[in-house]
Image (cartoon, grey):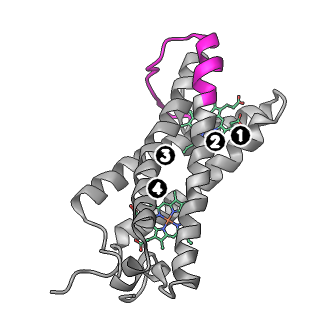
Amino acid sequence: MPPRNRYSRTAIGLHWLLALLIAGAFGMGLYVAGLPISPWRLRLMNWHKWAGVTILALSLLRLAWRLRHAPPPLPEPVLRAMPPWQQRLHQGTMAALYLLFFAVPLLGWAYSSAMGFPVVWMGMLPLPDFVAPDEAFAKSVLLPLHRGGAYLLAALVVVHVAGVLKHRWIDHANLLVRMWPGKEGV
Ligand code: HEM
Ligand code: HEM
């Protein structure tokens, strides 16, 4: 049987669900950070945390799936159009994205714990605090790391989408059909 030339339904479902959640959590984080203390800020902050913990859980699922299901090989014309530096950029971007899918939510959770605010997922499931309360450490180390990680994640998503568009418009290979529900693609 020839190798699959598209992602599985599970990988496609997780990709788009996580893309929406990550974009939403990023936007909400930026918005909440600028709000004065109020019940509205508190409520949005909780939604941000719940979305972030959901991203963490779904990322575990995505990683487990990815380890058991190799992604479809890049089409030959795409590989030929990619000089070695672009292939390294592609692999590096993917590895860094996967790392940040875990690091960013874990740092947010650690920050919350260190600030003395336990995380209760969806208001129902209390999560353990894995960092002792320490406000100075939270503010000077964990928040800048959470913020920096989130900005890096957003920058890598821009590189990722630019790569997909480059293949589409310059190499004339539409990779999007491999990541879209439907019939066999490229
Ligand atoms: C991939 C998931 C996440 C993304 C993309 C994300 C993104 C962000 C961003 C962009 C900010 C604003 C930083 C700033 O400019 O000051 C922020 C703040 C914050 N995030 Fe997250 N976050 C995620 C997950 C989480 C999780 C899981 C938690 C906790 C359970 C969390 C807790 C917080 C807290 C407490 C703040 C600080 C808000 C403030 O007091 O200024 N985040 N996040
Ligand atoms: C927060 C936003 C996004 C994140 C975090 C993200 C992440 C990823 C990851 C990790 C993969 C590798 C496949 C996997 O392991 O599941 C992937 C593949 C892919 N993504 Fe995204 N993505 C995002 C947004 C987008 C957008 C907006 C597009 C549309 C232009 C897109 C198009 C694709 C395509 C076409 C592939 C398959 C590439 C191939 O053919 O191998 N992604 N994405």
Disc sitting over residue 54 in the figure: 3
Name the residue type under label 4: Thr
Q: Is disc 2 surrounded by few (<14), some (14 to 19) or many (20+) residues within 10 Å?
A: some
Q: Which quarter of the picture shows residue 158?
A: bottom right
**Mark 1 Cβ inside 8 Å of ligand 1:** no
**Mark 4 Cβ inside 8 Å of ligand 2:** no
Question: Can the viewer see residue 118?
Answer: no
- As measured in the structure, the alpha-carbon distance from the residue carrying label 3 to the one carrying label 2 is 10 Å
- As measured in the structure, the alpha-carbon distance from the residue carrying label 3 to the one carrying label 1 is 15 Å
Q: Which quarter of the picture shows residue 80?
A: bottom left
Magenta-span inclusion, residue 141:
yes
Q: In the structure shown, which secondary structural element does the residue marked by tag 1 occupy?
A: helix
Q: Tell me if 176 is positioned left or right of 9 in this view.
A: right
Disc sitting over residue 47 in the figure: 2
What is the residue that sits farthest to the left in this orientation? 1
Name the residue type under label 1: Leu
Q: Position of residue 160 (x, y in %)?
A: 53, 63
Q: In the picture, which quadrant includes the C terminus?
A: bottom left
Q: Residue at x 57, y 24 (%)?
A: 142
- As measured in the structure, the alpha-carbon distance from the residue carrying label 2 to the one carrying label 1 is 5 Å
From the viewer's side, name the closer residue of 57 and 97: 97
Magenta span of residues: 123-144
User: On the image, numbered disc 4 is attached to which residue?
Assistant: 93
Give above or below for 38 relative to 155: above
Of pointers 3 and 1, the one earlier in the residue sequence: 1
- As measured in the structure, the alpha-carbon distance from the residue carrying label 1 to the one carrying label 4 is 30 Å
Q: Position of residue 17 (x, y in %)?
A: 51, 61
User: On the image, numbered disc 1 is attached to which residue?
Assistant: 44
Whether pointer 2 and pointer 4 mark residues with C-beta atoms closer than 8 Å, the reply is no
Of pointers 2 and 4, the one earlier in the residue sequence: 2
